[in-house]
Image (cartoon, rainbow, N blue to C red):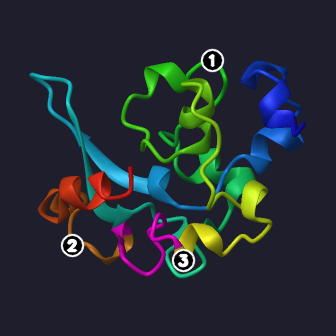
C-alpha cells in the first residue's frame, strides 16, 4: 500500500508530505476575509511569487522571507484552514477521502492535475499586475473555485 494509505498526515516524512502537493496552485490565490462573518473569498489573483504558467512558487524554500503571511500547511493546521479547496490532497486525506484519480501520485503524471481542469495554470493574474493590492477584490473567484471541488 502507498504511504498516504497507511500513514496519518502527522506520521509522514517531509518528502512524503511535500509529494502530496498536486501542483494545482489554488492555495497561492489571494483571499479576503469578511471581518463580520469570517467567510473567506478567493480571487483570481495569485501571490507575487507564483508562476502562473508553471503553476509553481518561484522561491518555495524562501517564500516566508518574501511573503511573511504565506501559510505553511502542516498536519496540525490543515483542519483550521477551511478555505483550502475541496480538491486539495492534504484536505482530502485529512477528511478520509483519499487522493483523486488525477493526482500525480495516482496517475504518475504531474500534468493530470492540469488536464483534469483542477489547477489554475494560465487562469490568474499576479498581484504585481494590480495598481493596488486591494484591487484583487475585483477578481472574485467563488463560482470558479467551486467547479474545482
Where does the magenta region start and end?
116-127
- Residue in the image at 36% along x and 36% along y: 83
Instruction: Please determine whether, in this image, residue 45 is positioned above or below residue 98.
Output: below
Q: Which residue is mark 1?
A: 76
Q: Which residue is mark 2?
A: 131
**139 displayed left or right of 47:** left
- Residue in the image at 56% along x and 21% along y: 77
Residue 87 drawn at (x, y percent): 48, 47
Is 121 in the magenta? Answer: yes
**Residue 72, visible in the rendered structure:** no
| Quadrant housing residue 93 | top right
Crowd band around label 2 with a 10 angstrom C-alpha radius: few (<14), some (14–19), many (20+): few
Residue 120 drawn at (x, y percent): 44, 69
**Circle 1 SS class:** loop
Crowd band around label 1 with a 10 angstrom C-alpha radius: few (<14), some (14–19), many (20+): few
Most prominent secondary structure in the magenta stretch? Answer: loop
**67 displayed left or right of 128:** right
**Circle 3 SS class:** helix
Q: Mark 2 or mark 3, which is nearer the start of the sequence?
A: 3
Distance Cα–Cα, label 3 vs label 1 = 31 Å
Residue 103 drawn at (x, y percent): 66, 57
Camera-nearest residue between 57 and 7: 7
Q: Which residue is mark 3?
A: 115
- Residue in the image at 54% along x and 34% along y: 91
Query: Which mark is nearer the camera, 3 or 1?
Result: 3
Distance Cα–Cα, label 3 vs label 2 = 32 Å
Q: Which quarter shows the N terminus?
A: top right
**Residue 81, visible in the rendered structure:** yes
Is 99 in the magenta? Answer: no
- Residue in the image at 20% along x and 30% along y: 39
Amino acid at each position: 500500500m502507498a504511504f498516504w494509505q497507511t500513514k496519518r498526515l502527522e506520521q509522514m516524512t517531509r518528502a512524503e508530505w511535500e509529494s502530496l502537493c498536486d501542483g494545482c496552485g489554488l492555495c497561492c490565490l489571494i483571499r479576503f476575509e469578511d471581518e463580520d462573518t469570517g467567510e473567506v473569498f478567493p480571487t483570481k489573483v495569485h501571490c507575487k511569487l507564483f508562476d502562473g504558467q508553471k503553476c509553481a512558487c518561484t522561491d518555495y524554500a524562501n517564500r516566508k522571507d518574501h511573503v511573511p503571511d504565506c501559510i505553511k500547511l502542516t498536519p496540525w493546521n490543515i483542519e483550521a484552514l477551511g478555505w483550502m479547496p475541496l480538491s486539495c490532497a492534504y484536505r482530502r486525506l485529512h477528511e478520509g477521502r483519499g487522493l483523486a484519480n488525477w493526482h500525480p501520485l495516482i496517475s504518475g503524471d504531474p500534468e493530470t492535475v492540469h488536464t483534469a481542469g483542477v489547477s489554475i495554470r494560465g487562469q490568474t493574474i499576479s498581484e504585481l499586475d494590480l495598481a493596488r493590492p486591494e484591487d484583487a477584490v475585483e477578481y472574485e473567484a467563488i463560482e470558479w473555485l467551486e467547479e474545482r471541488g
